[in-house]
Image: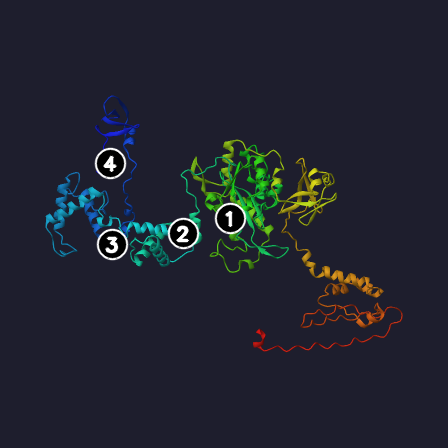
Amino acid sequence: MRDVHWIRPGIELDWHGEPAVITRVGALVTVSSLDGSSASQVPAVDVAIALRGDSAPADLPLLHDIEGRLSESAATRLREDSELLHIMLTGRRSSQPDTDRPPSDLDPARAPLGERRRRLAVLLAQQPRTKGKRKGFTVTVDSEMRRLQRIMKRWEEDQNLLDRRYLRPHTGRTDDAVLDALLNFLNDHALKSTKTDLALVRAFQIYCAGQLPTLELPSVTTLRRRVKELRRGWSHLRASAKNRISELNVPESSGMARLATRPGELVLFDTTKANVWVQDPRTGKKLRLDVTLAIDLATRCIVGIAITHSTTQFAIGLCLADVLRPKTAALASEWAKTAGEAPQQVFVGKPSAFISFYSAAFHPEGVVVDNGKPYVSSYVTAQMARLGIHYEPQRSYSPTDKSQVERVFRTVKDMFESLMPGFTGGSVDEKGQDPQNEQLITPATFEKRLRQCIDLYNHRTHQGLVLPDDPFKPVSPYIMYGILAQRVGAIIDIDYQHDWVRFLPSETVKISPSRVRVRRLNYKSPALRSLQGDPVVMKTRKLRVFYDPFDLRTVWCFDADGSLHPLRWQYLTEDTPRFGEFHTSHVVDQFADKQLSNKDAERILVNIFRGVYDQAEALGALGHEDLTDDLLRARAAALTQSAPALASEGLPALETSLPSVQPPPDRGRNGNKSPEPTLDLSATGEEAPHKTEEPSVSPRPRRALPAYGGMHR
């Protein structure tokens, strides 16, 4: 027997660091010192553990799926030998049911193995061979006996009837020194640009000629074969350069996974680019937003979300503010189906009574984020330290450190974003034809849809999320949250109800007693007058205001004592819907043709003080809707003014009637602007002088174009 040993008297072993010998074996094994001075009885299992070694025997990996790699003749011989072995051992064919009684001379209960083998050899000798050199002829009984004996011997030794040539490991003819040098060379080139197998072989030959001149290399064909084998076997040597770099960036795995046992113990943050094109309704610009998610590791619940135009320093703060902010029924109804279906609110001290996850304030004890510039903010980390939140920065561009978040991003892409217009796919290979030219949604609609989908995600059953006490019953993240929170029986929460505001983005603005201007909007509060005397404001002469980019109805500020002061938008009412930086109702766009530009307003203002519109009829016509439309469309059509009349009399004389509108003359080739059209009113009093005809201006003669060859001289 191989790879086994006996536990019997006389076997020496290392017992607790001292040499010893087994003197008696039974339920308790007697272990004595070599000189017999001391002896002790120990359980047999302890002796077995002490005698087992650390060196592993050679495995048999070639036996996996070996039947599929057999040749046709080898597979046929294996079936025939297996059938004969089955008859020798059971007396029946493998196709016969177990209820069939075998013949008496082949029955293992009536005849020994030798007699059964002899009887089977007699039966086989009576049948002519169907293949081989003796095809069509019968053989002797002794020849069939030797065949059956060989089958039984192979079965008793190896417990299989395979051709032993298939069990031999494949040995290549390439020296181990060449393979080691080739593997080291490929590892050094894994981070470089992708090359073909032939280019790698040539580079390896050049490397060996300079660094390993004594190494004998095989042929180019053999080296190419070895390169293919190595690249096929090692994952960091194949695929694209980007995937190879990512593979080498994976840290060494640990046998003990990091687990969280209670909600809020560890929260993972990460940011990804949205796979959906959106359109800014104000400017018409098409863009892809950045989505930051916060995942509770214990429950896999999405506990926070932040959507930004680009990943700036306030991305994690905005997401953390969303985690800490109690999502009341009124707040949750802003993205719920209807206001009546908003989740009910319960006391956070009784987690077993929660109906919707959005009803709970959530205080994470630890967060894991990428250690990149978008997340490095001294203010954010200081606020985390004040609240007792442990901050754990991780390596940038390392998805394996937060695989749970990356999996959630994949679910968001496949289940939610793929149903939105403007879906661009997760890679260049998945991108369709011009997804940004579809009927795109606005950023505000995208934020609302994503919050609705996150609510669905938290209450949807996850196949990979199980409770250790009941591992075969899948649960949803919200159910896992309720179970774990009930077991803990307590939730750590922040003392100050508005502490989440400190993590919102902020800006410093000039303060006045009546208002402050934030994000191009005016906000008012009676507290602004007293805040002018705040020590921090008096020192900087500016006020720091915190705001939510997707809800600008109210902004907040803190005084030097830390008290919160809400600032309301000056047009805020009880019915004002939620709006953000990317919001517009398109009401003003309906009157875009009536809007007066600053340039046109300045031109009309100059003409007013020049007295162009002093005539009563002109003043009346100026207020007429038709004339106002003409003035507003000054670029398309304008009124003309008599230049000689202005030169002779200083101010133009007004006429009792208005002339027709003439289009402006064309610009010259040299790009000079034509004179601005003005209003031709020639009467200024009771007597109107005779009109003077404006001399016709002949067009400037065009310069002949040079020949094609002269264009480059």
Q: Is residue 247 visible?
A: yes
Query: Is there a contact, CB below 8 Å, between mark 2 and mark 4?
Result: no
Residue type at mark 1 is Val
Q: Is residue 25 visible?
A: no
| Left or right relative to 281: residue 390 | left
Rendered residue at 25%/24% (across/down): 32
Rendering quarter of residue 117: top left
Q: Secondary structure at mark 1?
A: helix
**Tag 2 or tag 1, which sits nearer the N-term?**
2
Is label 1 or label 2 in front?
Answer: 2
Say above or below: 581 vs 301: below
Residue type at mark 2 is Ala
**Tag 1 or tag 3, which sits nearer the N-term?**
3
**Tag 4 or tag 3, which sits nearer the N-term?**
4
Q: CA distance from mark 1 to mark 2?
A: 32 Å
Instruction: Name the quadrant of the C terminus.
Output: bottom right
Q: Position of residue 362 (x, y in %)?
A: 56, 37
Residue type at mark 4 is Val
Q: CA distance from mark 3 to mark 2?
A: 38 Å
Q: CA distance from mark 1 to mark 4?
A: 54 Å
Rendered residue at 13%/48% (across/down): 144
Q: Which residue is mark 2?
A: 190
Residue 412 circle label: 1
| Left or right relative to 292: residue 100 | left
Q: Which residue is mark 4?
A: 4
Answer few, some or many: residues within 10 Å of disc 3's Cα (few below 14, many 20 plus, some between 14 and 19).
few
Q: CA distance from mark 3 to mark 4?
A: 34 Å
Query: Is there a contact, CB below 8 Å, between mark 3 and mark 2?
Result: no
